[in-house]
Amino acid sequence: MSDNGNLITQEIGSFRKPDYLSNVFKREKDEKKLTELKEKATVETLSLFERAGLTNVGVGGEMYRWEMYEHPAQRLDGIKFHGLVRSFDNRYYRKGSVISDLNVREHWHNDELEFVIANTKREIKMPITGPYTLMDWSFNEHYSSRHDLLMEFAKVVNGEIRSMNDIWKKSHPGKKFQVQIDEPAATTHPDEMDMFVESINEAVRGIDGLETSLHVCYSTDYRILFDVSEDLKIDGYNLEFANRDSLNAGKGEEDRPAYSTLRDFVDRESHKFMGVGVTDVHTDYIEPVNLIRDRIIYSMKIIGDPSRVRINPDCGLRTRSREVGFEKLKNMVDAVRSIP
């Protein structure tokens, strides 16, 4: 909990890597040396998050991964990689074709989770790429339909979450393991939302002791997601809003246009929590505390129950410098602490 006893402040994605890691991430052939650099960067980033005052430090900004698709896909048998394609935020990845049955060759988050557990006492949350995005960002040359490929990816994700949950339970018996399923592709095909729901539910099926959230960034219409909310077997959302908001101070509807979407959330959902994005990750403008506070107060007024509100940046801060990212996070925490 935050200092005011009500609102959790959380990091929900990637953070800018130090130059000593980013400059060699793709080129370093010595795996031991690369791991040492990842560990160093993780410790430094966890410290930065703790100095900013975050309640939940995620996994230290995802220092172990370059981007969200290729990191898991290259650890699966059955995928052949092609040339580079551009994802959002000017990050590139090798797009893969599924050419045979998917099989997990090695787990892709266990080492990261174990290291973070050993290096912070703060709350943590593991982001993992969701099955729908893995399916949508792959070519299908093997399975009979997008649905069949999707459900195979859902089984793969389920296995990865199970493995991480086993690690978590050994060090935190009786405490829920927090998992954030990242699905940037979720609402890009509105006619497939039934498939999307089925895949998310399969990804978490039968795993005890989880708190699950869904992170979707930059949807053109969150109502597509909220319309299926009751069918999603998750505990909450972490979504972006600041990117579409005004920079005007104020707690009125005319000042906070982006957050009015929250009314669609409360109209359709009465139980899940909402991680509200209050800082824009695509600009170096460091939102002042009073602006962030107004965004939070307006959001809380719509949602009503403070226990259902969490506070976060819109998405990962990897496109900003570490210095700017820190200031954005610190102002976010200070804004929460300033609310009576």
Image (spheres, rainbow, N blue to C red):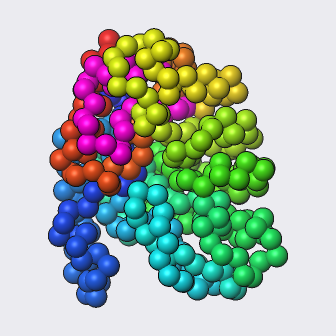
Q: Nearer the viewer, residue 112 or 238?
A: 238
Q: Is residue 272 left or right of residue 33?
A: right
Residue at 60 percent of width and 32 percent of height = 272
Residue at 55 percent of width and 22 percent of height = 260
Q: Position of residue 324 (x, y in %)?
A: 21, 44
Q: Nearer the viewer, residue 243 or 32?
A: 243
199 is higher (above) or lower (below) than 111: above
181 is higher (above) or lower (below) than 28: above
Q: How many marks?
A: 0
* Residue 202 shows up from this direction: yes
Q: Is residue 214 left or right of residue 64?
A: right
Q: Nearer the viewer, residue 35 or 100?
A: 100
Q: Position of residue 131 (x, y in %)?
A: 63, 62
Residue at 66 percent of width and 80 percent of height = 98
Quadrant in the picture for residue 229: top right
Q: Is residue 127 left or right of residue 150?
A: left
For the record, the magenta segment spans: 273-299
Q: Is residue 297 magenta?
A: yes
Position of the N terminus, as image quadrant, is top left
Position of the C terminus, as image quadrant, is top left
150 is higher (above) or lower (below) than 287: below
Q: Is residue 287 magenta?
A: yes
Residue at 38 percent of width and 50 percent of height = 316
Q: Position of residue 249 (x, y in %)?
A: 33, 17
Quadrant in the picture for residue 21: bottom left
* Residue 174 shows up from this direction: no
Q: Is residue 277 left or right of residue 4?
A: right
Q: Position of residue 277 (x, y in %)?
A: 43, 35
96 is higher (above) or lower (below) than 132: below
